[in-house]
Image (cartoon, rainbow, N blue to C red):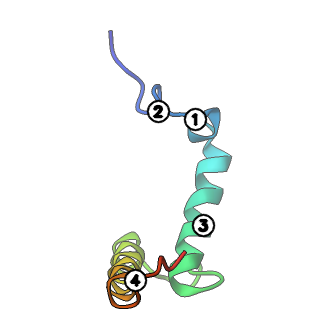
Amino acid sequence: MKIKPYETAPDSEWNDPIQRNLFIEKVSDLAFGDDTIERGYSMAEVLARLEKFCEFSHKWEEYSGEESC
């Protein structure tokens, strides 16, 4: 029995291509602002930027003793 990629997803949105694309667009826009995809940023650039944001957030939490979100 072959398992579908999103068969074990917590909700059905992962299996909806429109919702997946909307998710990708919104996450990308968190990294570089509006129209990230249209402005030509790659998935690798988006991930690197979000990882950097997380790194800064963790450093802030360690420094301040407060959660950043």
Measured Cα–Cα span from mark 4 to mark 2: 37 Å
Q: Earlier in the sequence, mark 2 or mark 3?
A: 2
Q: Which residue is mark 3?
A: 25
| Residue drawn at (39%, 88%) of the image | 60
Residue 52 is left or right of residue 22, and the answer is left
Numbered disc 2: secondary structure = loop
Q: Amino acid at mark 2?
A: Tyr
CB atoms of marks 2 and 3 within 8 Å: no
The tag on residue 15 is 1
Residue 27 is left or right of residue 43, and the answer is right
Measured Cα–Cα span from mark 1 to mark 4: 39 Å
Q: Which residue is mark 2?
A: 6
Numbered disc 3: secondary structure = helix
Q: Amino acid at mark 1?
A: Asn
Measured Cα–Cα span from mark 2 to mark 1: 6 Å
Residue 11 in picture, x, y percent from top left = 60, 34
